[in-house]
Amino acid sequence: MPIASHTPSLNPDILDNIVAWSDRSTLLVLMLSWRRINYGAAKRLLLHPDLENCIQIDKKGDQGVMSFVHFMDVAGGNRYHYLRAFTLCGFKISPSVAQKLADSLRRATNLKFLRLLDAELSLGLHPEIVPALNSLRSLEVLKIRCGGEHTHRLLANASWALLLAELNGIY
C-alpha cells in the first residue's frame, strides 16, 4: 500500500484541545514534530504563570541561552509578548551571549513573574543584564535568592510596581 503524499489535517478546534490538555513536556515534543501546533503550543508555554514551571535559563551556559533566544525570536519575535514568567539561575556565559540575553529580556514587555536564583553570581558575572531587568515595567512578582552588592544595586535602580517581593539570603 503506498504511503500518503500528504499529512491529514485536523480541525483547528481539535488542535486547540490538544494544546489545552497537554503538559509542558508533551507540548515541546509536539512543537518539534508538528509545525501546525507551534503557535498555540508556544503561546501556552509562555503564558504559564507558575514560577516553578516557567521558562528557565540554567547551567546549560551559552547553548541554553542561545536556545532560549532562538525560540523567542521565531515568528519575528512575537513570542516575547506572551512571556509571563522567567527564572535566571547563577551561571557563567560569554559576554556576547549575556548581551543577547539582555536584549531578549528587554523585549519581554509583559513579563509578570521574575525569579533570580543565585542572583549575586548572575548579576556580578553579567552586569549587562541589570539594565535589562530594570527596564521591565510590567513586573509584578520578584523572587530573589542569594543576593548581595549587585542585587542591592538592581533593587535600588528599579522602578517596578511590584505586588510581591520575596528576598531570601540577601546580605
Image (spheres, rainbow, N blue to C red):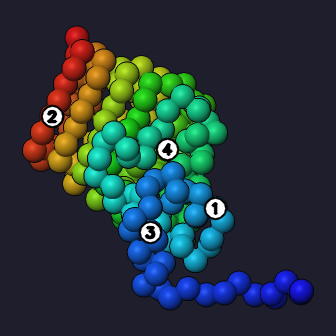
Name the amino acid, label 4: Leu
User: Which secondary structure lies at badge 2?
Assistant: strand
Q: Quadrant of residue 78?
A: bottom left
Residue 45's quadrant in the figure?
A: bottom left
Q: Count residues near mark 2 (Cα–Cα under 10 Å), then give few for <14, some for 14-19, many for 20+.
A: few
Q: Is residue 26 left or right of residue 1?
A: left
Look at the picture and state if 80 lies above or below 148: below
Q: Nearer the viewer, mark 4 or mark 2?
A: 2
> Is residue 30 in view from this perspective?
yes
Which of the two labelled residues, at mark 3 and mark 4, occupies the earlier sequence position?
3
Q: CA distance from mark 3 to mark 4?
A: 28 Å
**Badge 1 element:** helix
Q: Amino acid at mark 1?
A: Leu
On the image, numbered disc 2 is attached to which residue? 165
Q: Are marks 3 and 4 in contact (CB under 8 Å)?
A: no
Residue that badge 1 annotates:
32
Q: Is disc 1 in contact with disc 4, using a CB cutoff of under 8 Å?
A: no
| Figure quadrant of the C terminus | top left
Which of the two discs, 2 and 1, labels the residue nearer the N terminus? Answer: 1
Q: Do the residues bearing badges 4 and 2 touch, measured as CB atoms within 8 Å?
A: no
The tag on residue 101 is 4
Q: Decide if residue 47 is on the left or right side of residue 24.
A: left
